[in-house]
Amino acid sequence: MLVAATALLALPLAAEAQQKPSRPWAEDVLYFVLIDRFADGSNANNMDVQRDNPGGFHGGDLVGLTRKLDDLADLGITAIWINPVALNIKGAVGAGSFMHYGHHGYWADDLSKMDPRFGTEAELKAFVDEAHRRGIKVLLDIVYNHAGYDSAYTKRPDARDILRTTDWGTCKEEGDDITMCVGGLPDFKTEKPEVARMVVEKQIARAKAAGIDGYRLDTVKHLTPEFWAYHRKTMRENFGKDFFLLGEIFGADYLVADAYFERDDMDAALDFSFKGETLGWLQGRGRTAAYSRFLQKRHKVRPGYIMSHYLSSHDVPMALGELGGDVQKFRLAAALQMASVGMPQIYYGEEVARTGNDWPSNRTDMPWGKDATLPGKGVKRDDGLRDYYKRLIAARRANPAFAHGDYTELAKDGDLLVFQRAMPDSGNAVLVAVNRSEKPQSATVALPASWAGKTVTDALTGKALGKAEASLALTVDGLTAQYLVAN
Ligand SMILES: [Ca+2]
Ligand SMILES: [Ca+2]
């Protein structure tokens, strides 16, 4: 019944482009979707679907994703990053039972066309309009650095002028960062202005027609600073000054990303440091004081720029898998993520305990449980974890101190970390307490002066802890996080 109702609701297309959400990017909670693995909304675009092959196409598309927007709005996320949608190669890499196809969108065959497996340009626009109607922004993933294996580019008469490639459409992984073939993928010679224009301009019309809010930029460190300067200028000319650019500078933390921010090449970068530090601390590696110092240092990001911190992605093992399936510890990781400065990024399905670990199992189907949506129909999911994520996200959105506040360490001895996120100007403050041990831990912490006379409440449970005084004797249960607020 639920499925039939949502299918009907998604049918009428928005008559006009919806107004873009005006929320500052620093306040967004991002959700990253691999379209092929999320929701199959149309059989008509299913070609070569092999749901038993972890490297195959599983049939998900933009129509299916659009039908799930109410579900994502209910989770509380405010922006969605979708994988590249340019036409991908038809062939596969690999042999036997594991043939790896371009189901992820990163192996372009023709940048000027859209991959029909994901949908049509009209369906992309309908998805963006419906997202905007719910206050959700859309980031489109864009690859400028390389083409897919054995793509149509390799077969062009001028292939050697535009690509580092061989006749068989792959390339040795050698050279420097700029000229190497990442993963053996033929490298576009983007240091040539005409090639830079080709890869950039072929993708503008589609994004413009759809009303996309910004790009997630792939393989940033494999293109030159001159390319990124040209790119920023071209984006602003075409989309206006607010078009958001989130770069994947592989391995970067705020220090590495700063060279790009200093030149204003982009607005934000993926934070490759958060996951390892956080899982390491939760697994008992390293002292609480050192982890607290790490969280504090993340605030040193250049003002006006954003680091987007994740726990899992399509390029790294799933965090829950790395924690050995320990959902309680994973909850603590999510609580730390939502309490930290930057743009938290949820990788599809980790909010319902999607199973998987390292590639290719980090790209499994979105678990839909009893919902009849393919390809993840019948796949077990943890709705209790989703409820927990809803509470984390709601608390983050209700308290601007999470996005904008400073960081003050309050307790860092043993296994209990307590810190304050506060905005001195507005008075909004949150105390975050996370206990990584299995036993209850206690600490006495100072409370913000602005809390005097108010009731201290744990925003995650709704439980009142009493009237605020100058300090609070806090006890946190084993493997538990608290977000203390005053009201
Ligand atoms: Ca489909
Ligand atoms: Ca390159």
Image (cartoon, helix red, strand yellow):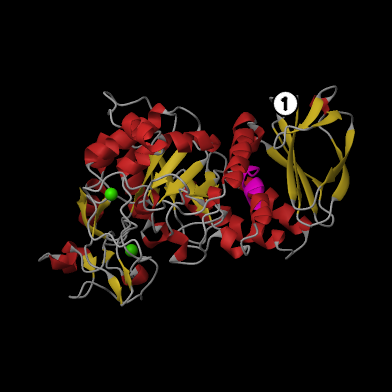
Residue 122's image quarter? top left
Judged by its main secondary structure, the magenta piece is helix
Q: How many numbered marks, from 0 up?
A: 1
Residue 76 in the image: x percent, y percent?
A: 53, 35
Q: Residue furthest left?
A: 157
Q: Which residue is mark 1?
A: 427
Q: Residue furthest front?
A: 1
Residue 372 in the image: x percent, y percent?
A: 39, 45
**Relative to 229, is 457 above or below?**
above
For image coordinates 39% across by 27% down, the residue present is 133
**Is residue 239 in sight in this rendering?**
no
Please state, as top left, top right, bottom left or bottom right, where the C terminus lies in the image: top right
For mark 1, give the secondary structure: loop
What range of the chain is rendered magenta? 333-341
Residue 94 in the image: x percent, y percent?
A: 31, 75
Q: Is residue 485 left or right of residue 235?
A: right
Residue 339 among magenta residues: yes
Residue 242 in the image: x percent, y percent?
A: 40, 33
Residue 12 among magenta residues: no
**Is residue 289 in sight in this rendering?**
yes
For image coordinates 30% across by 41% down, the residue present is 63
Please state, as top left, top right, bottom left or bottom right, where the N terminus lies in the image: top left
For image coordinates 47% across by 38% down, the residue present is 72
